Image (cartoon, helix red, strand yellow):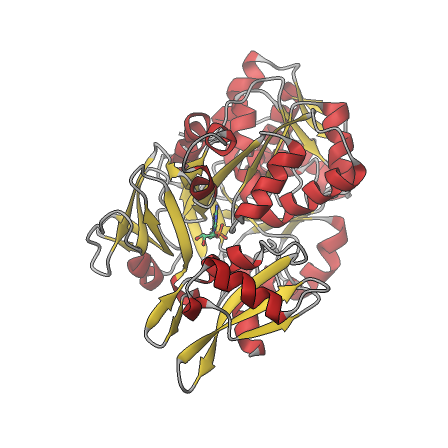
Amino acid sequence: MNLAQLLVRTARTHPTRPAILLGDRPLFDYGTLAGRASRIARFLRNSARLEPGARVAVCMVNCVEYLETLYGIWWAGLTAVPINAKLHAKEVAFIVQNAEAAALFVSDTLAADVLSQIPDLRDVFVPGRAEYDALLRAEPLAPQPRAPDDVAWLFYTSGTTGQPKGVMQTHRNLYAATTCYFAAVDDVSADDATVYAAPISHGAGIYNFQHVLKGARHVVPESHGFEPAELVALSRSVGRLSMFAAPTMVKRLVDHVQAADADTAGFKTIVYGGGPMYVEDIKHALDTMGDRFAQIYGQGESPMTITALSRDQIADRAHPRWESRLASVGIAQPVVEVKVADADGNPLPVGETGEILVRGDTVMAGYWRNPEATARTLRDGWLWTGDLGSFDDDGFLTLKDRSKDLIISGGTNIYPREVEEVLLRHPAVQEVSVVGGKDPEWGEIVVAFVVGTGVTSAELDALCLDHIARFKRPKQYRFVDQLPKNNYGKVLKTALRDLL
Ligand code: AMP
């Protein structure tokens, strides 16, 4: 079992189908993509002399060489370590060293900075430079065998706190996540295209597999990232465009579409996840762009596969529990069992909040060379996600917050998400994040950081009194220009707490 077989299979049956596009220009068909991957594989094994299982780091901005690099690594029987290109060079160096990567693929624009931190690395390949062209002149290699539980992708967690850990995602994990997509999230056909607006090193890249399997097109934006106007233009020229987007990206895209009064018929499915999507925001997205949204909840430790809220469920306005479903992350994906448990792992009744536990073929093998963290996170066959949530009678899971973000004020639990949902109802509030501030009397108090102009604390207070219990109301409002976010657009609540 080797993920490279997905590409082998499609290249054999549909060699002339377009595979890689730069903007709307087709560059490589599937036959060419597979040929390039097999040559990269030969070079890595024969010239760079990497042994099966050796780690190869990839720190590249989204580019047309990204997929051939990943598949070349798997084709050669090696392990890929994709690294977010927005990380600081020192953070990249930490990951390269922690993974004991033997080689590195790095973008031209990042090479000088990154290499200054890891001067001793022997094999470095920069697309566009001579040593990368040398890779592509090697003879093709037959795909190398891998066992299902061999590590395919060493996925460094985004780390909103502490040092990132390497999640060992095996070939089995990623196969299971791939096939589950078709059952839980969306169908894919050969006419479809997936656009990499979010980093390939993360969720957007994990969704390459479904599109390779179906022989669909992979679109790399010329901007290499997320530009709403460019995406709208691509949706028109490429058509049937799907993408994975963090909720903050969805919001920006929707705002652009509304301001430009753009036609969105060329978008097929926008899958959002990776952070909370507020009810007001998804409703606005549906009103503006139509019923083309699906949601997933996952984490590196069970990549993209814990629960999903399907397009139909999101579109079902007539359902009596539509709003609460929009606030949820949907139902368990069919590849996993999901339970909400108490501190001993016992399942809790419907409606009660506890930690979310996951079991199934997509759950990671553990953290790379970190048995302590693995033992804390994988217990009795279950993945302890660190997320809190509760099920409703229909099996829809609503996330409360990460356990560390929970606010305990006067001994009572307050879930920031609930307060955030209410504050966002105010039309002038653009973004909000609620955290606990230390308080001698209450232990913690609720503090809301608010981005928005022309809105007062009194108005927000009144809004809260209308919708939630008095004790959940923020005791302080801090108006800010923006919220601190990590490189994946997740709000850094730790940084907000530090501000307090
Ligand atoms: P990462 O491993 O970096 O992808 O981060 C995973 C974490 O992001 C999860 O443990 C959740 O806390 C959060 N997350 C992922 N998907 C969602 C979602 N659909 N809604 C809210 N939070 C999410």
Residue 492 appears in the rendering? no
Residue lying at 35% horizontally and 77% vertically, measured from the top left: 410
Along the line of sight, which residue is nearer the eye, 457 or 375? 457
- Picture quarter with the C terminus: bottom right
Residue positioned most to the right: 260
Measuring 52% from the left and 38% from the top, which residue is drawn there?
A: 206
Q: Quadrant of the N terminus?
A: top left
Residue 53 appears left or right of 492:
left
Q: In the displayed structure, would residue 56 be above or below residue 112?
A: above
In screen coordinates, is 87 left or right of 260?
Answer: left
Q: Is residue 496 visible?
A: yes
Q: Does residue 254 sit above or below 269 in this rendering?
A: below
Q: How many marks?
A: 0
For the point 75% across and 33% down, the residue is 232
- x, y (%) of residue 241? 65, 27
> Is 166 in front, or is 325?
325
Residue found at the very far bottom of the displayed protein: 440
Residue 238 in the image: above or below residue 354: above
Name the residue: 75% across, 28% down: 263
Across and down, in percent, residue 483 comes to: 63, 64
Q: Answer left or right for 66 relative to 263.
A: left
Q: Position of residue 7 (x, y in %)?
A: 54, 25
User: x, y percentage for residue 348?
Assistant: 22, 51
Q: Nearer the viewer, residue 17 or 301?
A: 301
